[in-house]
Image (tube, grey):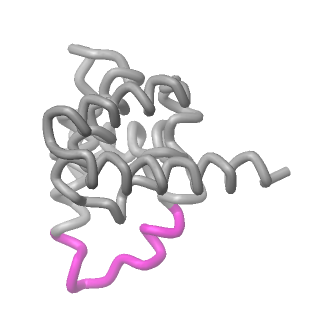
Amino acid sequence: MSERYTNGMRKRREVLGDAHVDKAEAAKTDLDADFQQLIAEGTWGTVWASDGISLRERSMLTLALLAALGNFDEIPMHIRATINTGASKRDVIEAFQHVAIYAGVPRANHALKLAKQTFAEMEDKP
């Protein structure tokens, strides 16, 4: 594999955790292998690996963009990743307030609901 892929997988594990990445890798098939490589290299090996902004800032941007575009399925995963990115609950709320103003209250409201549920689940784990 390429250096970008290797770096991307390292960053993916840093942000999402080994358990998440191991589960995703175990579910990979021939059908989605090329897509998974694209994500590892582009998303994680290029964008998330950049040192242009901090992981905390990148986490906040990602959550805001997911909410603004209505990509709600990935919000819980990125809320769980805040443990590793350094984004606080307050940071998440601030990001979703921006979504409310610039992209719409219903999307921000739903994202906040998902965040509350996910944070509660995280607190319940030993």
| Pick the front one: 2 or 8 | 8
- Report the side of 63 relative to 45 (left or right): right
Q: State the residue at coordinates (25%, 84%).
A: 30
Question: Total marks drawn?
Answer: 0
Majority SS type along the magenta span: helix
Relative to 75, say whether 79 is above or below.
above
- Report the side of 65 relative to 25 (left or right): left
| Pick the front one: 93 or 5 | 93
Relative to 55, say whether 8 is above or below.
below
Q: Quadrant of residue 63?
A: top left
On whether residue 73 falls in the magenta region, the answer is no
Q: Pinpoint residue 60: horizontal percent, then vertical percent.
A: 35, 30
Q: State the residue at coordinates (36%, 77%).
A: 28
On whether residue 27 falls in the magenta region, the answer is yes
| Pick the front one: 10 or 98 | 98
Q: State the residue at coordinates (24%, 73%).
A: 33
Q: Which residues are magenta?
A: 22-34
Q: Quadrant of residue 37?
A: bottom left
Q: Pinpoint residue 44: horizontal percent, then vertical percent.
A: 28, 42
Relative to 25, say whether 102 is above or below.
above
Q: State the residue at coordinates (46%, 39%).
A: 15
Q: Pinpoint residue 59: horizontal percent, then vertical percent.
A: 36, 32
Q: Pinpoint residue 81: horizontal percent, then vertical percent.
A: 50, 42
